[in-house]
Amino acid sequence: MVLAMHMGNELLSIPMAVVTLALAGLLVGAAALRARKTLSAEKLPLMGVMGAFVFAGQMINFTLPGMPGTSGHLVGGVLLAIVLGPAAAIVTLTAILVVQCFLFQDGGLLALGCNILNMGVLPCVLGWGLYRLALGAAERAKAWRQYAATWLACVAGVTAGAALVPVEASFSGVLRIPTVQFLGVMVGVHLLIGFIEGLITFVVVAYLREIRPEALGLTPAAAGAGGVRTGAGKLSRGAVAASFLVTAALLAGVIAWFASGSPGGLEWSLLEHRYGTGEKAAGEGSSAASGADTWQAKWSLLPDYGKRSAPLGEAPAGAKGVQEPSEGGASAVKGWTSLAGMIGTAVTLGIVYLAGAILRRRGSIVGENGRQG
Amino acid sequence: MHHRYIDRFAQGDSPVHRLDARAKLIAVVAYSAVVISFPRYAVTELAPLAVMPMAMLWLGGVPAWFALRRVLLLSPFVLFVCLLSPWYDRALHPAGFGSWRFEIAGGWLTSADIAAKFTLGVLALTALTSTTRFAWMLEGMRRLGAPSMLLVQLGFLYRYLFVLIDEAMRVRRGRDFRGAALAPAGRRLSAAGSILANLFVRTLERSERISMAMAARGYAGEWHGLNVLRFRARDAAFLAGVALYLAACRWPWLSAR
């Protein structure tokens, strides 16, 4: 997680830091009150110790298929929200972020408010809500449905949190990088991270269903009676492939979108609309997911429409016509420079990522300790 | 893995270590606020601000390589932002260094400014955390009014962080010895998931044992710590000095008059 979205002091202005710190303090205070009410007294150590678990869980890495040299590991926010409930998860993640700030200097002192909002409050609340919404009745859920719910929760939670970083930075006014470009990069990268997170969170949840169903709030009888015992631990290859395709299509869509110029307010709402449909479709099943996939593929041809307007007629959404005039004629040139900017961004990101990977391997505390054994 | 591996310098003893945790915390928060209060194109104005963290690190006996390595480790994201800025902000700005006058693109100034602010922030935070024990920091935060619920969880997190990391390392070593790297991707993933879930369950059980042990020792909802913090005259002097220094850095024309 070299590109983990820890925000530093340097991207913030003082008013923004004060506002986010106050907001985060308020929300975490509310979450702490709620957690105290819902958790019994003998579960007091649970949240802190779970925070330690998230750190320890990051030691269990695995190399990603098709991407040698990179390795994935659990980030943990959505898993905590699923198992502990959003309130306790927010308190736990806040504790994690404070320790990361103090012990590892990850994220600045004044940016703590932003980081708590981006990586604690939003992923927990959004991820937990979507998970419950998509899962339906937990004790009868089939494996694919649980997988879809977990994937949805992780992708949405992680990406939404990451998308807040450029927004906060632009409100602070420190950066001169256009918010839209920055947003495109953050969203693109974190879609992938969310996908990996969803995969591994699901594997953990599936295993928990088998050996500790009560940890997920199920009675053991319900978990057994639902017939999940046989198939819950198995990751359906089709489900993984479908979710990967949808993620890739979303990714292509985002890159196409942000590369095709600077969208205005109208297009923004359109983007959100599309996001919503894409994810809902994925939650509903593989056939709907593949439908969304082809639909997205059509849509990702968009960067080309600067040159040829033929696909416009075939375009599924009528709203595209609204957007066309802003792109026509002279501004096509602008679009090309922003595309170049986008490619430059991606290349820079790659270089930085590699540098980060090398640095981490050489000198990180974790890496060194791993070698020591 | 012992916790001294990460915060070994915090256990030391020096004039900086002996300062009250509250004084250092307030000083570093104020320092960070002053650093980010400088405008976007300020670069050379930030230079005097390097004095305070350097001095704290030096007086606290923390080696410079340790602090600089922290800066390097954390730099990739900031580096990414810095490399992008010149691409977008190409308006020329007059700049001067001594008698040398030239024009430079605003993007480069922003990059340098962000990099400098980042370095200063990390140095100051390193200076704070490597001269203050975590337990004392928590006690200081409690006295400053942070919610006790969060502080208790922080205490647990810190206490069990190293225990659980140790456990995870042992499991990982076992997995690697059994040739996990040779397995196909699906098997690797499900192995990682099973290990994580297993650790998760073990952690749940551990937290139950902890709360039983706490109950056995008479825990009744009240947290008691060793009261080691005392705000002395030297802490007040330290804070006053920091305030003067920060004011002089922020508004140099005041001291020039």
Image (cartoon, helix red, strand yellow):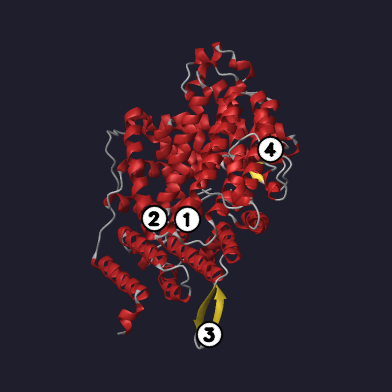
Q: Is residue A199 left or right of residue A110?
A: right
Tag 2: Cα neighbours inside 10 Å, few (<14), some, or many (≥20)?
Answer: many
Q: Badge 1 is on which residue?
A: A169
Residue at image position (51%, 17%) is A139
Q: Earlier in the sequence, mark 4 or mark 1?
A: 1
Q: Badge 4 is on which residue?
A: A313
**Image x and y of residue B257, in percent:** 30, 85
**Disc 4 to disc 2, C-alpha distance:** 45 Å
**Disc 2 to disc 1, C-alpha distance:** 9 Å
Nearest-to-viewer mark from 4 and 2: 4
Residue at image position (64%, 42%) is A253
Q: Chain of mark 2?
A: A
The three-letter amino acid code for the residue at tag 2 is: Met
Contact, mark 4 vs mark 1 (Cβ under 8 Å): no
The three-letter amino acid code for the residue at tag 3 is: Arg
Q: Is residue A332 left or right of residue B62?
A: right
Nearest-to-viewer mark from 3 and 4: 4
Q: Earlier in the sequence, mark 2 or mark 1?
A: 2
Rendered position, B108 above or below A168 = below
**Disc 2 to disc 3, C-alpha distance:** 34 Å
Q: Badge 2 is on which residue?
A: A16
**Image x and y of residue A249, in percent:** 66, 38
Query: In front: B14, or A283?
Result: A283
Q: Chain of mark 1?
A: A
